[in-house]
Amino acid sequence: MPIQTILDLSTVHMTMADESLLRSMHSADDGHPEGSVIIAYPYEHGWTVSTSVFGMGRPASDPAASQHDLAIVKRLQDQGYSREFGLLLVHAYRLGCTMVRLDRDGEVEPDLPVFDWGAEMATAWLAAADDHAADDDGDNPSP
């Protein structure tokens, strides 16, 4: 009987932009639209992401598998995901996990990067405010 291992982590191990890309990817299709490197499914408190694209079915110690994995990380980056997100999935694969569960109440792993979503939201809000101010050519003065 096959048993799968899932790495259970906090969503703080992905960026807010990574989560946004997962959400837009999933809403566009069934969780794996054409051209997408990864398969991911949302649930109430986070995401479950497959590591099936890594390793080429070879042991993690195989140099060809490592080269393949880094190429997948690069493809993820080309699709807009952070390098850290790709490396997190490689890490899970090399631990023997078939999935990563990123849960808002999941464990924070001290050896993995952590992202402050509050700071990311503040930065995004400030950038949007700056864009709005730049778009305002003075024709509509503030009260």
Image: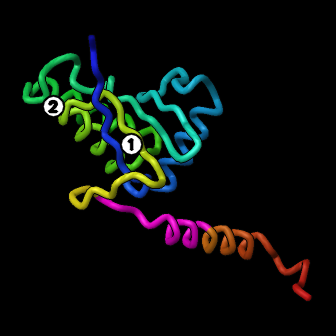
Can you give x and y, in whole percent of width and height, for residue 7 in the image?
A: 31, 40
Q: Is residue 123 magenta?
A: yes
**Label 2 crowd (10 A; few <14 / some 14-19 / many >=20):** some
Q: Residue furthest bottom?
A: 143
List the single residue furthest toward the top. 1
Q: Which badge, 1 or 2, comes first in the chain's sequence?
A: 2
- Asked if 17 appears above or below 23 in the picture, the reply is below
Which quadrant: the C terminus? bottom right
Mark 1 crowdedness (10 Å alpha carbons): few <14, some 14-19, many ≥20:
some
Which quadrant holds residue 51? Answer: top left
Residue displayed at 56% across by 48% down: 20
The tally of labels here is 2
Q: Which mark is residue 114?
A: none
- Distance from Cα at disc 1 to Cα at disc 2: 17 Å
- In the image shown, does 1 or 84 lie closer to the viewer? 1
Estimate the x, y position of residue 70 in percent, counting from the top left: 23, 36
- In the visual, does 138 lie left or right of 118? right
Please name the residue that numbered disc 1 is placed on: 77
x, y (%) of residue 95?
19, 36
**Amino acid marked by disc 1:** Gln
Q: Is residue 78 magenta?
A: no
Q: Which residue is mark 2?
A: 66
Q: Which residues are magenta?
A: 113-124
Quadrant assignment for the N terminus: top left
**In the rendered view, would you say 79 is above or below 3?**
below
